[in-house]
Image: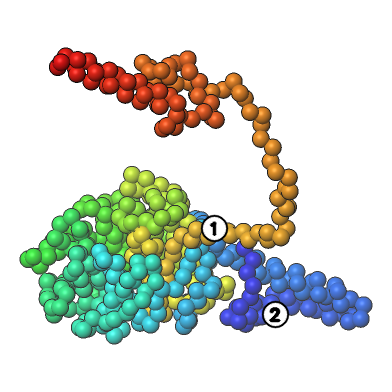
Amino acid sequence: MTRLLTNDDSLDYDILFRANTGQMQASVASLTLSGHVELMRFVLITAIMALLTTDSFAAPWDIVPTAEEESERITPAMPVQLQRGTGIGSLQTLPELDITLSATGLGEISALALSEDGTIYSADKKTGRIWALSDRGLDGKIDLRRPLPHTFLQPTGLAAIGDTLYVADQHAVWSIMPGQPPKKIASLRESDSSGQPYVLRAMHNSPSLILGLTTHTQTSRVLKIDIPTGRASLITESSKGPLNSVAVNGSTNIWAGHGETLGALGSDPTRFASGQSVADILLPGRHKFPVNWPAQLREHIIASQVGPNAMHLIAIPTEFGQISGQPRVLLDGFMNRSQRSAWGKPGAMVMDQRGLFLANSHNGTLLRLSPKPEPEPKITIVDTETLSLPPLEEPVLSPKNESLGLRSTIQGTQINAASTILKPSSIEYGSKLIKDYDEKKALEKAEKAKIETKKKR
């Protein structure tokens, strides 16, 4: 994939260009400027294009190499310098999706949690603040940001159940109910933690929390904390490296990222390249999807991958709760072409019908990955002056068919089934038919009265 040089890339490519083109410059120096300008220009452009294509730049849906595949390449791990700024203009994703900026100024984001009413909670590890981000229109646009009234010591774990927020910091696991001060659920002073981030997840089918931590011996533990009693029970302990992420789907389906690996507890994990770890995980079936969310992503794990040569979101296909294919790039562009600097790094995630919210953990920004909006219907304006004029002649009707008539269905009257009433016909009160009837009745009445008079005599 070809990309234009940025200001950050220019110095690196200038050094590489001078280092790799020493022999070429010696051979070109003998050319005269007047006779071979076009040739020199062609040689220089060819050299630059060769340098640009020597190191591939990951594009959306490119395959992410695993440790076995990566061992076949020469990819020296180089330190990455994190830069300030959103860097949203350099991010790339699938054609069906949009990446937008939802919130800024959230500090060093160490965790996210999503409540039932759509409020997103963000933990600032540096200041100890917990931010409540409201989206009153539920359209993905954060329109209200407020800090909670209490601060914590390096909070790194958040979870929400109902209207209660749970926070894990260096001292304990706390619960925060609306309008009440934090309440300690379980102390972490005796947890043998190395001080590395605690990972907190909610189990919505039971009053329990899942807590992940790394011990002083660099083993990782996943524990279950009973909320009413604060009692902790060990689920698993692993020597695969520090615990970076945990995801829960049900009571038994628990995934964890240890060191450079990712997998369900009790199964063989997938190992990524050296130094590349998974900072957060979203499991399929655990979250609501937006309308028009790409179908190929509905059965994929979404993971934030960080490390040398890897600062991106990846999508991992699953089948029957197990990884079933090669991981692919979903969102890239945090790192520049030289792979020596990056616009922050992807971190915590939450997801609902509004889209996938992703924290840039270094720059304090919240990004939203969502389906592109439906195109608005086109309105066509027609100039009536260009339309043809209506015909001047009156329309000619078809000839009248005199044989057609209305056959009466009234039986037992003078108008029987054989009668035909044509349009000009009419029977009005006072017609001869009515007058004859009235005269006849009057004669019958007079005759009746005459007979009765004779009888009286």
194 or 101, nearer to the observer: 101
Kindly identify the residue that appears in the image at 29 percent across and 78 percent down: 131
449 or 49, nearer to the observer: 449
53 or 86, nearer to the observer: 86
Q: Residues within 10 Å of mark 1 (few under 14, many from 20)?
A: few
Kindly identify the residue that appears in the image at 20 percent across and 83 percent down: 150
Q: Amino acid at mark 2?
A: Arg
Left or right? Give the position of 435 relative to 399: left
Looking at the figure, which quarter contains the N terminus?
A: bottom right
Which label number is shown at residue 377? 1
The answer to which of marks 1 and 2 sits earlier in the sequence is: 2
Looking at the figure, which quarter contains the C terminus?
A: top left
Q: Please state the horizontal and vertical placement of residue 386, each as a whole percent of the image.
A: 73, 58
User: Is there any visible trace of residue 446 in the rendered image?
Assistant: yes
Left or right? Give the position of 167 relative to 373: left
Q: Please state the horizontal and vertical placement of residue 289, each as a whole percent of the image.
A: 37, 56
Which label number is shown at residue 18? 2
Which label number is shown at residue 200? none
Kindly identify the residue that appears in the image at 49 percent across and 64 percent down: 98
Left or right? Give the position of 158 relative to 385: left
Residue at the far right in the pictured view? 35
341 or 238, nearer to the observer: 341
User: Is there any visible trace of residue 232 in the rendered image?
Assistant: no
Q: Is residue 323 above or below residue 414?
A: below
Q: Find numbered disc 2 in the image and state the secondary structure of the residue it sits on.
A: helix
Q: Residues within 10 Å of mark 2 (few under 14, many from 20)?
A: few
Q: Amino acid at mark 1?
A: Pro
Q: Please state the horizontal and vertical placement of residue 267, each as a whole percent of the image.
A: 30, 50
Query: CB of mark 1 within 8 Å of CB of mark 2?
Result: no
